């Protein structure tokens, strides 16, 4: 298995997972977070290397926001353009709960096949 | 990936813009804004490293321009698919004509037309006052800063108008403001602002919004009142005829035959047809206005404005 097929598999997996992880991070956080902060939290959770490319979380944040799962406000910043801070909404929490259940079910289902038997 | 990796924020943004060439201008503006927020924060977080050292690692953290570009394309396609409620378009000609009543865009467009008189007056006053004061104060020290603040405010107003138009007509408009090149010198930025044709087209849009607003408002109000009056004419006719409630003064239509009971179905039919036509007209105006607003308020996707 070469590197590119591994990357493609990871990318396919990430499709829906980015949204779930972002909702979970914002649900845990007691304060509002902006894109860069979220990206760094993702990276620090996995020894400095996020399994998502950090650039891919921004469009997902905007999509979640457009679907009313997140709200946002803009705060000026010294280092660059004004930052958009995100916070999870009540519909967002409901969706997170639903997605978490789906994820747990999927993970258990997949593990049932992968854990049993010797690896090829 | 084969291209040489960008070594500065400007190079990165230019590469990202190239990767997104052909996409919606509003999407490009958003993507560049997000990337700039991240890259500037990343550079600021590593004061010990030079910008090119930070950028060297960016492909493995933020992602290379082509990866980021494809993330925006994919997400945009998915969101568009998820947000558009599938409509079953009526097949028959009559179905297509009356189907407009099921289209939320027709209602929001009428609302936009009614609102446009108010926004038109506000924009016009704002733009004319700002321009006049800028011209008048230009001989004083505060003239230039005043003009800059005024132009900055136009951009905020332009973003807000874009959000309103996207909500009303569904046309994709920017979700982020335009971010000026912060590191350029003060006078360069002033020069850029004056040279940026979007500054002037935005001002033109704000001023022209008053005549447009007046026309839209008149169409909406006249159209709604005439068609609704026709549609509900029988109610008034019978109420008055049987004395359910008295109207001060008779309700009287001018061609005399309209005052008979038999003319009522014709009145209703005319009212409904007028109302339906108004819905079509409003939806069309909404679409045209969104295209027109996008031309004047959003920078084209050409890689010209980035220095």
Image: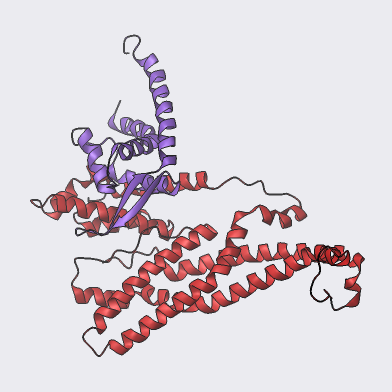
Question: Residue B72: image x %, image y %?
Answer: 38, 48
**Res. B288 visible in picture:** no
- Residue at the left extreme of this rendering: B48
Task: Tell me: B19 left or right of A38.
Answer: right
Q: Is residue B221 visible?
A: yes
Q: Count of labels shown? A: 0
Left or right: residue A10 versus residue B251 is: left
Q: Position of residue A30 (x, y in %)?
A: 27, 41
Front-lying residue, A71 or B29 = A71
x and y percentages locating residue B154 in the rendered image: 37, 72
Location of the C terminus of chain B by quadrant is bottom left
Describe the colour scheme in one phrase: by chain
Figure check: B123 above or below A64? below
Residue B79 percent coordinates (x, y): 46, 46
- Residue at image location 39% in from the left, 82% down from the top: B129
Task: Using the rendered view, name the quadrant where residue A69 is placed.
Answer: top left
Apparent colour of chain A? purple
Q: Residue at x 33, y 38 (%)?
A: A27
Write the residue at 59% across / 57% down.
Answer: B105
Q: Relative to the observer, which residue lies in front, B163 or B4?
A: B163
Q: Quadrant of residue B177?
A: bottom left
Q: Which of these two is toward me, B10 or B283?
A: B283
B235 or A92: nearer the viewer = B235
Colour seen for chain B:
red
Indicate whether B55 appears above or below B283: above
């Amino acid at each position: 298995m070469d590197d590119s097929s591994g990357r493609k598999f990871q990318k396919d997996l990430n499709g829906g997972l980015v949204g779930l992880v972002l909702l979970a991070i914002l649900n845990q956080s007691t304060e509002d977070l902006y894109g860069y902060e979220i990206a760094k939290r993702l990276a620090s959770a996995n020894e400095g290397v996020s399994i998502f490319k950090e650039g891919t979380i921004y469009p997902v944040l905007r999509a979640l926001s457009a679907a009313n799962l997140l709200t946002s406000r803009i705060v000026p910043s010294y280092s660059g353009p004004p930052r958009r801070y995100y916070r999870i909404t009540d519909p967002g929490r409901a969706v997170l709960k639903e997605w978490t259940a789906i994820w747990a079910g999927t993970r258990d289902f997949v593990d049932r096949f992968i854990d049993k038997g010797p690896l090829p | 990936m084969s291209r040489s990796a960008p070594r500065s924020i400007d190079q990165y943004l230019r590469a990202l813009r190239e990767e997104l060439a052909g996409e919606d201008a509003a999407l490009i503006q958003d993507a560049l804004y997000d990337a700039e927020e991240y890259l500037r924060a990343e550079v600021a977080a590593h004061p010990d490293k030079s910008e090119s050292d930070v950028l060297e690692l960016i492909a493995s953290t933020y992602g290379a321009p082509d990866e980021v570009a494809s993330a925006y394309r994919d997400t945009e396609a998915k969101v568009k698919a998820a947000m558009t409620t599938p409509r079953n378009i009526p097949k028959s000609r009559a179905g297509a004509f009356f189907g407009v009543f099921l289209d939320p865009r027709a209602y929001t467009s009428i609302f936009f037309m009614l609102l446009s008189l108010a926004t038109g007056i506000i924009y016009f006053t704002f733009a004319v006052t700002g321009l006049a004061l800028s011209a008048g104060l230009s001989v004083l020290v505060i003239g230039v800063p005043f003009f800059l603040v005024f132009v900055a405010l136009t951009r905020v107003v332009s973003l807000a108008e874009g959000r309103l138009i996207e909500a009303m007509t569904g046309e994709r408009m920017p979700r982020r403001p335009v971010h000026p090149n912060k590191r350029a010198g003060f006078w360069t930025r002033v020069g850029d602002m004056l040279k940026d044709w979007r500054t002037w087209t935005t001002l033109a849009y704000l001023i022209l919004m008053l005549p447009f607003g007046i026309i839209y408002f008149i169409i909406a109000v006249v159209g709604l009142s005439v068609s609704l009056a026709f549609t509900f004419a029988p109610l008034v006719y019978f109420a008055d005829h049987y004395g359910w409630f008295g109207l001060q003064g008779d309700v009287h239509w001018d061609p005399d035959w309209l005052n008979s009971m038999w003319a009522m179905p014709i009145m209703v039919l005319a009212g409904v047809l007028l109302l339906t036509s108004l819905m079509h007209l409003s939806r069309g105006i909404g679409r045209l206005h969104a295209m027109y607003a996008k031309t004047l308020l959003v920078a084209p996707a050409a890689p010209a404005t980035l220095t």
